[in-house]
Image (spheres, helix red, strand yellow):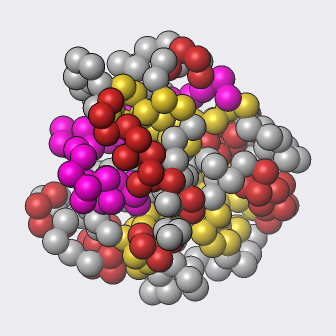
Amino acid sequence: MVLIKDITSLKPDKIRAVIRSGKWDKPTTGIALGYAQANLVILPKKYALDFFLFCQRNPKPCPLLEVLEPGDFRPDFLASEADVRTDAPRYNVYVKGNLKASPTSVKELWRKDFVTFFLGCSFSFEEAIIRSGIPVRHIEEGKNVPMYLTSIKCRPAGIFHGPMVVTMRPVNPAEVVKVVQITSRYAFVHGGPVHIGDPEIIGIKNLEKPDFGDPVTIKEGEIPVFWACGVTPQAAAMEARPNICITHAPGHMFITDILNEKLATT
């Protein structure tokens, strides 16, 4: 496997080549800093309109960056030389709502009717947070970001419905306003927080036991800050139970060639 210090120095196309070769199957937080990362959802065409409407109705957790034609596996806008079937470090394959496999390639599963959706990811704005001098705990600790199912319900569309999933980053109270200001510029990668403070208000019972990802240290006096998360479609897929749904494994994102600042508002 490639060492983290080696892969962080590479450009997105080189990182995708490492991933495609099978030499990197870990989360992508902290790598390709400055470039947008994307959540993946791949569905048969018959479910595509319902999911497209689900994204439109829930832009906070499901900000659409690009949608491909049925059968296409090379994004035109985000990374024209990439292959969506092989270029995420790990995928989740759901069959009728049940997780059946987490392979490093879905090339052998590919079908001509598959429609690929790319959704913005909050890993993208972490570079801006770090650049401002505010630490990001899961990067400091070499972990995946903690993700939680919440009591916040998404607006349904067709077969798709379910709870919003959020990521959590602990923040010093003196820096909360600054973090909100920074992340709010990046609406295409979830934007500003959906909740600040008491996790029980949004249905989270124990921050030490995330539903996805890894727990991180919350230091005395720090406030948990929650952002909408692109794992929300996986929760929706588990509720909707389509015949098949392929996503990235949580934290194992598709790395694009698009600079974060291209997706930021002024």
- Residue 137 in sight: yes
Viewer-nearest residue: 165 or 24? 165
Residue segment shown in magenta: 123-152
Q: Is residue 138 left or right of residue 246?
A: left
Residue 74 located left or right of residue 136: right
Please tell me whether residue 236 is drawn above or below residue 224 in the rendered image. Answer: below
In this rendering, does residue 101 appear at all? no
Q: Quadrant of the N terminus?
A: bottom left
Question: Image point 54% across, 32% down: which residue?
Answer: 195
The image position of residue 94, as x and y in percent, is 62, 44
**Magenta stretch holds residue 52:** no
Q: Nearer the viewer, residue 211 or 152?
A: 152
Residue sitting at 72 percent across and 48 percent down?
58
- Residue 134 shown in magenta: yes
Location of residue 209 in the rendering, given as x and y in whole percent from the top left corner: 40, 20
The x and y percentages for residue 225 are 43, 33
Residue farthest to the right, as pictured: 158
When asked about the image quadrant of residue 34, the answer is: bottom left
Name the residue: 55% across, 52% down: 190
Query: In terms of depth relative to the viewer, which is nearer, 53 or 90?
Result: 53
Q: Which image quadrant for residue 142?
A: top left
User: Does residue 242 appear left or right of residue 66 in this picture?
Assistant: right
x, y (%) of residue 203? Answer: 59, 18
